[in-house]
């Protein structure tokens, strides 16, 4: 066998083994991931995945710079309509290909927006002051100066650091805000941009509280909510655009169970004082940040939006119920759970556990993985370094979609307890338990999805004899 053929065989053997492990043998509990449905995956592999559809608004008309794009143009418009319905908003920008890019597009647009009225010859400036969540208190990397905020906020000449201040947290619960201090900080500092949202996300953000304070300022700040982790819980968890936020950003592959992309959403009617900010957001999406915006995943996003709008209420309700049941069960077996017990420890899909009494978070996350339970080690707010994390971050969204309910997460808490506290080996037991959950829910039923998938598969690979050969090999593999 040639080196080329050997490499191909080896690669596909490893792909098959990894697919089998992640989809059949292990509990996937990372809060920032999900498995797309069969039909979303079929959309992703369809013809648009190799195409371009650059476009921008010029003299009030949307101009496309490629031919052969009528279909994908309709797809982008339909996806925009579905997502505007999901958010209850007027505007959605879909050309960002990650949540981090969505944030950076807003930051770029903010800089352009605040410089629109400057006098001729006056130097442009960056944002004067930004408020966000501290990285060590659960803030998302993409909203930090070391992340996507880099270069878009002014430096303090005395400290040499960016002018960023943090939302204060409660002394009793570092996952909730200190509202009194927050009000004082806002009044004293008056930031130009306030960024809500976290990656360690178990309680609500004070959007309404802040919106009420800044409403009557001469120049109110732009309020942005990075909902990457909780985008699929929009409405059931929080509804920022109704609560006073101007912009929502997020990635579409965490609790929102689509392909890996990003989006920006908001309400910017033509009479809005922030209408020009929206025009700047569109311009920074293209041509400012993207050329090809990955049309295969755009098609997949449309399919996922259909699913989300159809199954949103039942899915969201089950996710939150499962997270609360999971947290309570972990606490009951003796594993400390972060958050407010009065709120069921969590109001999202995430559960945070403190494991430092049983070892280093990195080591325990690896031990859980070796036992077919995939999690995410996490530095908690009182940790001195990310290299010695005290926590493990868990998410219920993916396994909820595979049919797990409250009692199933109680059972899973017992397996985690065996690994974390008792250092027992439960790999085979976990795999056996996982195989009970192999059917995806909150999507088109399999008996209806498979014929549709077969049609798309056949249209993507129309080669003579291909489908017969493919099906024959499937029969050989499955016996």
Image (cartoon, grey):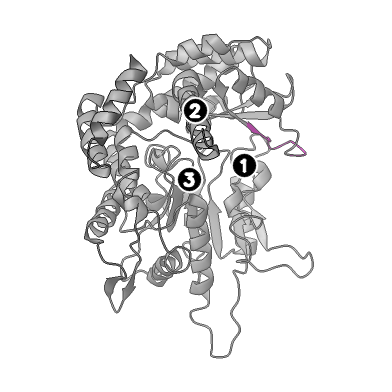
Residue named by callout 2: 13
Q: Quadrant of residue 384?
A: top right
Return the residue nearer the eye: 367 or 463: 463
Task: Report the span colored magenta.
Answer: 377-385
Q: Nearer the viewer, mark 3 or mark 1?
A: 3
Residue at the bottom extreme of this rendering:
120
Q: What element does badge 3 sit on?
A: loop
Do residues under tags 2 and 3 come within 8 Å of each other at their CB atoms? no
What residue lies at 37% left-to-right and 32% top-to-bottom?
316
Residue 379 included in the magenta stretch of the image = yes
Is 454 situated left or right of 435 in this image? left
Q: Please tell me whether mark 1 sits on a helix, a strand or a loop.
A: loop
Asked whether 65 falls inside the magenta stretch, the response is: no
On screen, residue 189 versus residue 115, left or right, reads right
Drawn side of residue 402 relative to residue 469, left or right: right
Quadrant of the snapshot with the C terminus: top left
Residue identifier under label 1: 138
Alpha carbons under labels 2 and 3: distance apart: 33 Å
What is the CA distance from the residue labelled 3 to the residue labelled 1? Answer: 13 Å
């Amino acid at each position: 066998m040639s080196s080329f053929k050997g490499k191909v065989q080896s690669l596909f053997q490893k792909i098959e083994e990894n697919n089998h492990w992640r989809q059949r043998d292990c509990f996937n509990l990372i809060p920032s991931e999900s498995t797309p449905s069969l039909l979303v995956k079929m959309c992703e592999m369809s013809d648009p995945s190799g195409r371009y559809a650059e476009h921008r608004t010029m003299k009030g008309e949307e101009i496309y710079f490629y031919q052969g794009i009528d279909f994908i143009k309709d797809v982008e418009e339909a996806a925009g309509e579905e997502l505007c319905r999901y958010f209850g908003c007027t505007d959605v920008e879909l050309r960002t290909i990650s949540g981090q890019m969505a944030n950076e597009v807003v930051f770029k647009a903010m800089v352009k927006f605040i410089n629109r009225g400057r006098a001729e010859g006056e130097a442009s400036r960056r944002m004067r002051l930004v408020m966000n969540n501290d990285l060590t208190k659960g803030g998302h990397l993409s909203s930090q100066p070391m992340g996507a905020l880099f270069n878009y906020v002014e430096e303090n000449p005395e400290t040499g650091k960016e002018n960023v201040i943090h939302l204060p947290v409660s002394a009793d619960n570092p996952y909730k805000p200190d509202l009194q201090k927050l009000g004082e900080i806002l009044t004293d500092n008056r930031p130009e941009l306030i960024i809500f949202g976290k990656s360690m996300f178990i309680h609500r953000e004070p959007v309404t509280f802040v919106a009420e304070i800044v409403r009557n300022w001469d120049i109110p700040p732009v309020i942005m909510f990075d909902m990457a982790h909780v985008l699929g819980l929009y409405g059931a968890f929080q509804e920022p655009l109704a609560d006073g936020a101007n912009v929502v950003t997020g990635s579409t592959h965490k609790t929102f169970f689509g392909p890996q992309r990003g989006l920006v959403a908001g309400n910017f009617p033509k009479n809005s004082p922030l209408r020009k900010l929206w025009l700047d957001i569109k311009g920074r999406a293209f041509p400012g940040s993207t050329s090809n915006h990955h049309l295969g995943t755009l098609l997949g996003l449309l399919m996922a939006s259909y699913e989300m709008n159809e199954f949103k209420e039942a899915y969201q309700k089950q996710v939150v119920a499962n997270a609360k049941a999971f947290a309570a069960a972990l606490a009951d077996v003796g594993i400390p759970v972060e958050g407010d017990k009065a709120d069921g420890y969590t109001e999202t899909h995430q559960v945070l556990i403190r494991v430092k009494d049983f070892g280093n978070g990195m080591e325990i996350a690896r031990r859980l993985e070796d036992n077919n339970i995939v999690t995410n080690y996490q530095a908690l707010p009182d940790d001195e370094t990310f290299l010695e994390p005290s926590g493990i971050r868990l998410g219920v969204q993916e396994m909820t979609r595979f049919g797990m309910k409250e009692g199933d997460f109680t059972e899973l808490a017992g397996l985690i307890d065996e690994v974390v506290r008792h250092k027992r080996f439960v790999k085979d037991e976990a795999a056996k338990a996982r195989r009970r959950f192999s059917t995806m829910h909150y999507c088109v039923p399999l008996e209806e999805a498979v014929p549709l998938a077969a049609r798309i598969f056949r249209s993507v690979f129309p080669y003579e004899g291909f489908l017969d050969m493919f099906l024959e090999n499937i029969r050989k593999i499955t016996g």
